[in-house]
């Protein structure tokens, strides 16, 4: 899966949780929780959605690595390639 | 139109889930109602048959307006499909205005004496008015059958109109309410007192609230569909209305409730370690959030301190009929709601997590049940998610306490005589000084902290 | 002046005045504002008015605009109606409403009907000032409250002026109204003083005013009696009963929406007036509450009015006949079921 595809997967999941998400204005390095007003339930729903969509596991300890758009994409790239390797 | 939370004056029927002729049982969801704050599923308060819908979908009416007419189970109800025959007992549906059941006192007395249900009498007088002759004919036609149960107007109980309205809204039987007014008349305050001291029939089944309605599957999509247009156009109206509703409740709180505030910062390092271990073996969908620990700890702490769990109504404290924790859930467009997790103390952490997920989803997407907004006996707010350390909360009347949870944050902490960095959290308790004193409040707060420190007790 | 200065509102300058002075100032403002305005009535010129409201106006505006009339109420009102129909803006004064009965034919059969009878061709923009109420030992021919008689009649507007703000803010919109307006003033309040803004605000002619917000019971009243009701409300507050006091102000049309909204909050209503109870404004208000707010009521609507007698001269009997703080407190307590 390409970086762009992964980015689309993340944005799609975010849009379901926070419908007003605008991919055009979402800063790649911004903290998603601040930017989109996500609470811990939203964060859990995001992680759950990503895990189900990509068929991977994301341990709780790794949540902080997914707190920006770029961070999430980079993390998922590593996980997906590890899973398929 | 039931009152679905303090500060609600009007509501709009968005959708009916039942039609005339449908049998309904108590607790069943019958309609979706739009209030200033949310779209809410309305449950029916008693078993029966829907005889007539009095308010069409799309219409906004004041709280207290009758929405539908219910008949006893087994009553023949003329549905739009089967409206033939029986001229004498044809329903009053053909009277021009659905609410204008116009009768004189003489006619009503006659109907009462002869056991005729006036709603089922076809009026032949001017403008559909029911005459004495109509009642006599109806009485003759139904003579073999036993007298119908008396209409509300003739139930033989003295009660003020407002008390009757309140009783109907709360699904109370007036005959069970002791009247304190002139000649033993039931006044509004008697109904309020009865409603909070447990005469109130609590929703049929125990926890978890079973969603047995036929609208179960249809409700969330329907709610989403009806919310969408409302949210795009008059979103600001809804936002302002929500603001107004919160303003009314909070004004009342600050005006009427003498708050006292207590707070304590506690070390929850080991509890969070325990939680991480629990979650480590689970897929994300089954993981627990720390929020459920706070909800459970609060619920357990209240078991021994009932004077913080309940309502202050008309100058007296009325303990809750269970520990129903209202969970403050902010809405993405602003505003918040605090629906209840009923009997939170009796639920496992997994059950609480499932209930919380369900509540958050339904609060934000629509589909809350009316009772969920009026049930809470205490409110818990987890503002720590927004990154603040402490909260001094405002109590939602008529509740008497509020527990606020701050941000989980590492702090230097003395442990066994040594300085360590531990994750800590601030617990704030706001309580109504009319219902409890600081000493009792402190005991509750300490008990919450104790439960949090020993997660195996949760 | 800086931008911040411009946004800070200065505290409005205030001045202390009697209600009599407030009435006079609004008459003066009307005379200054519109040259079609003139005053006519018994003893309003040289004598300065029976209650001294027009004192000095003759010197200021001259006999063309401050016109003393013969002692004939029917002539005063009839002339005023004719002048109004022909483009003037007369303010006719009838010393007390007890004498207004002599002008009833002109008011009801002409002023109130001509717009209707002329198929909309003739408005009658006349303003009639008169007074009502007891409390000054003037006995049965000078003390009655006839507001309900006029409030009964379609085609006229009836307003009662018992506060400084209303005395100063109602006359201008009354003169602008194209139809007849009857203004009730209250002799026993004329010397009442208050601190008021130098520049008066315009008052909405057709609205009631909540004089005291409260949550336990709605007390509806009008005219001079509202001050007695407000005193009673304070006494009740000391007793833990929070009464909302509504001054109807506009007696026709009635601003019943304000009353219904209040009853929806308090669930109890008491109507207090100085006119006789039977077929009074209190009866009308109580009936409307029963019609429109029945399911908000937690107690029957109660009414207090004048005892059903011609008003006595003797002080103690006059006091006993009209609503007093004690009788209002007792009735409200009864309605609150705190007998």
Image (cartoon, coloured by chain):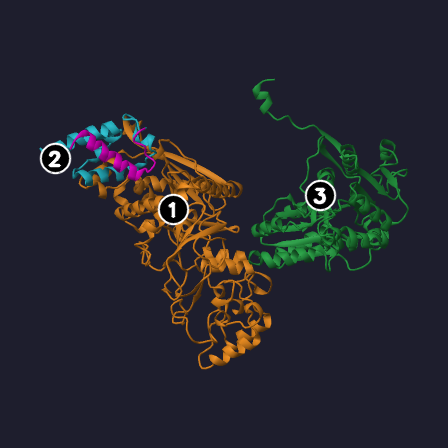
Chain colours: A cyan, B orange, C green
* Vertical side of B127 occupied by C67: above or below: above
The residue carrying mark 2 is A83
Q: Quick check: marks 1 and 3 in contact, CB under 8 Å?
A: no
Q: Is residue C96 left or right of residue B153?
A: right
Q: Residue at x 38, y 46 (%)?
A: B227
Instruction: Report if residue A4 lies within the magenta region.
Output: yes
Label at residue B30: none
Q: Indicate the chain on which mark 3 is placed.
A: C
Q: Residue furthest top?
A: C1
Element under disc 2:
helix
Residue that carries the numbered disc 1 in the rendered image: B227
- Label 1 and label 3: CA atoms lie apart by 46 Å
> Percent position (x, y) of residue B355?
30, 48
Q: Which residue is mark 3?
A: C177
Question: Depth-wise, is mark 2 or mark 3 nearer the camera?
Answer: 3
- The region drawn magenta spans A1-24
* Quadrant housing the C terminus of chain B: top left
Is residue C279 at all visible to an observer of this figure? yes
CB under 8 Å between callouts 2 and 3? no
Under circle 3, the secondary element is: loop
For label 1, the SS is helix
- Residue B188: which quarter of the image? bottom right
């Amino acid at each position: 899966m390409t970086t762009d595809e992964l980015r689309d997967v993340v944005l799609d999941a975010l849009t379901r949780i926070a419908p007003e998400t605008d991919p055009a204005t979402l800063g790649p390095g911004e903290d998603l929780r601040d930017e989109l007003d996500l609470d811990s339930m939203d964060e859990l729903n995001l992680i759950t959605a990503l895990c189900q969509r990509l068929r991977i596991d994301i341990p709780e300890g790794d949540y902080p690595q997914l707190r920006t758009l770029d961070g999430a994409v980079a993390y998922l790239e590593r996980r997906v390639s590890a899973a398929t390797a | 139109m039931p009152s679905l939370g303090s500060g609600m004056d009007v509501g709009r029927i968005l959708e009916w889930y039942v039609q005339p002729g449908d049998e309904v049982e108590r607790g069943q969801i019958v309609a979706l109602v739009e209030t200033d704050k949310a779209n809410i599923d309305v449950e029916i308060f008693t078993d029966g048959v829907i005889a007539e819908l009095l308010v069409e979908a799309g219409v906004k009416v004041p709280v207290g307006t009758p929405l539908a007419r219910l008949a006893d189970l087994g009553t023949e109800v003329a549905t739009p499909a089967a409206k033939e025959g029986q001229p004498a007992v044809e329903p009053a549906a053909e009277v021009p205005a659905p609410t204008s059941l116009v009768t004189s006192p003489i006619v009503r007395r006659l109907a009462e004496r002869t056991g005729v249900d006036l709603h089922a009498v076809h009026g032949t007088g001017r403008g559909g008015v029911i005459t004495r002759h109509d009642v006599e004919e109806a009485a003759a036609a139904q003579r073999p059958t036993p007298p119908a149960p008396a209409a509300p107007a003739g139930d033989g109980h003295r009660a003020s109109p407002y008390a009757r309205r309140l009783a109907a809204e709360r699904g109370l039987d007036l005959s069970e309410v002791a009247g304190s007014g002139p000649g033993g008349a039931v006044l509004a305050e008697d109904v309020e007192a009865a409603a909070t001291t447990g005469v109130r029939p609590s929703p049929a089944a125990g926890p978890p609230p079973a969603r047995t309605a036929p609208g179960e599957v249809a409700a969330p999509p329907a709610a989403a569909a009806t919310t969408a247009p409302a949210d795009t156009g008059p979103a600001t109206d809804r936002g302002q209305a929500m603001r107004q509703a919160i303003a009314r409740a909070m004004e009342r709180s600050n005006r009427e409730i003498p708050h006292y505030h207590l707070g304590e910062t506690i070390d929850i390092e080991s509890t969070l370690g325990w939680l991480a271990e629990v979650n480590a073996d689970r897929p994300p969908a089954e993981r627990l959030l720390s929020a459920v620990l706070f909800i459970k700890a609060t619920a357990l702490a209240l078991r021994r301190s009932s004077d913080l769990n309940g309502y202050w109504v008309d100058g007296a404290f009325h303990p809750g009929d269970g520990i129903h924790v209202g969970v403050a859930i902010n809405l993405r467009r602003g505003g918040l709601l605090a629906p209840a997790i009923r009997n939170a103390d009796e639920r496992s952490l997994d059950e609480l997590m499932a209930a919380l997920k369900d509540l958050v989803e339904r609060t934000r997407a629509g589909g809350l049940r009316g009772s969920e907004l009026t049930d809470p006996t205490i409110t818990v707010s987890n503002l720590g998610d927004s990154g603040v350390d402490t909260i001094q909360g405002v109590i939602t009347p008529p509740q008497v306490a509020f527990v606020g949870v701050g941000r989980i944050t590492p702090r230097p902490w003395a442990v066994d005589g040594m300085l360590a960095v531990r994750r800590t959290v601030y617990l704030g308790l706001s309580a109504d000084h009319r219902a409890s004193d600081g000493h009792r409040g402190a005991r509750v707060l300490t008990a919450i902290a104790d439960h949090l420190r020993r997660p195996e007790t949760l | 002046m800086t931008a911040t200065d411009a946004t800070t509102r200065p505290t409005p300058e205030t001045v202390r005045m009697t209600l009599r002075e407030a009435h006079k100032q609004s008459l003066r403002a009307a005379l200054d504002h519109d040259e079609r305005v003139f005053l006519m009535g018994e003893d309003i010129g040289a004598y300065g008015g029976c209650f001294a409201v027009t004192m000095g106006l003759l010197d200021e505006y001259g006999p063309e605009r401050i016109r003393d009339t013969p002692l004939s109420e029917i002539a005063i009102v009839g002339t005023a109606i004719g002048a109004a129909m022909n483009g003037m803006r007369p303010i006719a004064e009838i010393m007390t409403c007890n004498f207004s009965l002599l002008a009833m034919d002109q008011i009801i059969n002409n002023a109130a009907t001509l717009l209707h009878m002329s198929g909309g061709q003739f408005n009658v923009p006349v303003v009639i000032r008169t007074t009502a109420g007891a409390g000054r030992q003037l006995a049965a021919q000078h003390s009655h409250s006839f507001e309900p008689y006029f409030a009964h009649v379609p085609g006229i507007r009836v307003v009662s002026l018992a506060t400084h703000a209303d005395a100063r803010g109602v006359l201008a919109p009354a003169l602008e109204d194209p139809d007849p307006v009857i203004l009730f003033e209250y002799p026993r309040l004329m010397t009442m003083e208050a601190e008021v803004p130098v520049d008066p605000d315009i008052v909405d002619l057709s609205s009631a005013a909540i004089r005291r917000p409260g949550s336990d019971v709605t007390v509806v009243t009008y005219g001079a009696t509202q001050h007695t009701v407000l005193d009673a409300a304070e006494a009740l507050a000391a007793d833990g009963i929070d009464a909302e006091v509504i001054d109807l102000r506009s007696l026709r049309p009635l601003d019943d929406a304000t009353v219904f909204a209040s009853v929806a909050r308090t669930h109890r209503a008491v109507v207090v007036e100085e006119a006789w109870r039977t077929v009074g404004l209190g009866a009308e208000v109580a009936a409307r509450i029963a019609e429109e707010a029945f399911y908000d009521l937690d107690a029957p609507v109660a009414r207090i009015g004048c005892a059903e007698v011609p008003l006595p001269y003797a002080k103690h009997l006059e006091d006993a006949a009209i609503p007093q703080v004690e009788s209002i407190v007792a009735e409200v307590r009864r309605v609150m079921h705190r007998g």
